[in-house]
Image: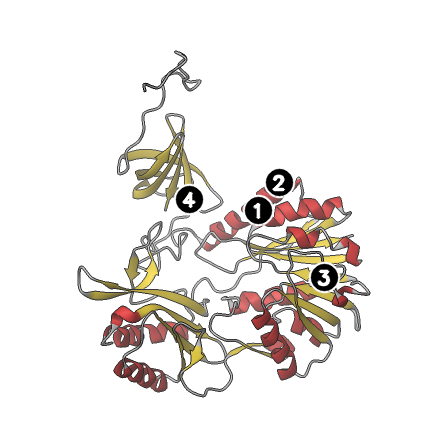
Amino acid sequence: MARRTSGLRFQPSGGEKAQQLPVGKKQRLSIERLANDGRGIGFNASRTWFIEGALPGEQVEARVLAARRQIVEARCEQVLQSSPSRRTETCRHARQCGGCNLQHASAEDQLALKQAALAEHLQRTAGLEPQAWAPALSGPEFGYRRRARLAARWDERHGRLAVGFRARSSQDIIALEQCPVLVQPLQNLLPDLLGVLHSLERPRTLGHIELFSGAGEALLVRHVGALAVADRERLLAFTRQHRLQLWLQGEEGPQPAEDYGFLGYRLEPWALELAWRPGDFVQVNASVNQAMVQQALEWLALRDGERVLDLFCGLGNFALPMARSGAEVVAVEGVEAMVARARDNARLNGLDNVHFFQADLSKPLADAPWAAGGFSAALLDPPRDGAFEVVRQVAALGVQRLVYVSCNPATLARDSVELVSQGYRLKQAGVLDMFPQTAHVEAMALFER
């Protein structure tokens, strides 16, 4: 049956409907500013273009990747007029790899972008500006990443193993021989590691490869089928030669291939050692992590014996330093395995003034036994989706000072609205540059009631 129509035709206010742009079409554009994700923004024929690899003030030729209505996603193919801020990328894979998207921008411009993104989210969503902006916490531009996951996939068409990071906006794997954002021990390891992986008899069994560097180095091999005996021996010989721990993960969780000692990292200012297992969450930037913990403690200004709550506590990255500083700490985490690891870390460091509990942090907290008596201070370090259910309850727990550590300014801003409605003021906020060479923004905010 033919579709019936009303006879009316709707057009954009500018007149004729804009013609659809085909993928691959090239367009010359002037870049006016950067989006929060680091892409350049340009305008043409009533469309807004978001262009990977372009900087403000530049004239570029861009290639269309996708187009819908008035939004065009594109990639910079050629810089016709360069910005004074543009620099040559350190890594030869930077324009294809999905790991870094801002290597072409100066360190100063990267920080300015992140600070502007945080300020914009707070203002637009919450109508807030802190009473004081804290200087950004930053560390080395390169050689900072102590943990990395490499994708591995057997290429049937070419009969070879591909190992590397995912390509930008794609599931393709960028085969790499170097990665300058890795800490030096992992950079040194990479060429030999690629060599042994390419020598395996059954490379089709590989899923992904994970590297970690802390008090020692570790290699996790995720395999989707049984490892050949010879392959296991090759991997063991490689890790013994390089003094690495080898962990294997099949259908079960990660397991050590041999009896190893301590695997983890140190927080030097507090003389703490935190044990870690592959698969656990850990901040990848050691120097910024240490500065972040130090700033959180300074902002909370804890007194000896003061009762403080640490939510989303993980391994105890904040809870153990707070306990070392003399506070009485209650730390809560949703994952039971992490709670067990955190308790072990407290025992390892001889701390008996920190107590770890497992709880669903999307549920009411006030009736939990550990919440009895309330808290004068609290710290939140939630995942990207934020802590909306938690912040709805902090006033009822008596919290007067709250430090919120965020890996997503959008959910921080959303949760700030709720905190303000409970009578809290935003005293300080600042950027944590945990991931240089990317547009990823981490932040810390201090609220007082």
The residue beneath circle 3 is: 378
Check disc 2 and report the residue beneath it.
125
- The crowd level at tag 1 (other Cα within 10 Å; few <14, some 14-19, many 20+) is many
Q: Residues within 10 Å of mark 3 (few under 14, many from 20)?
A: many
> Gap in Å between the C-alphas at discs 1 and 4?
18 Å
Residue on which the image places disc 4? 39
Which color scheme is applied?
Answer: secondary structure
Taking depth in this image into account, of 436 and 313 the one nearest to the observer is 313
Q: From the viewer's perspective, is residue 17 above or below residue 349?
A: above
Mark 2 / mark 4, whichever is N-terminal:
4
Q: Secondary structure at mark 3?
A: strand
Image depth: mark 2 or mark 4 in front: 2
Separation of residues labelled 3 and 1 (CA atoms): 21 Å
Amino acid at dot 3: Ala
What is the distance, in whole Å, between disc 2 and disc 1 at their CAs? 8 Å
Q: Between 425 and 332, which is closer to the camera in this rendering?
A: 332
Sooner in the amino-acid sequence: mark 3 or mark 1: 3
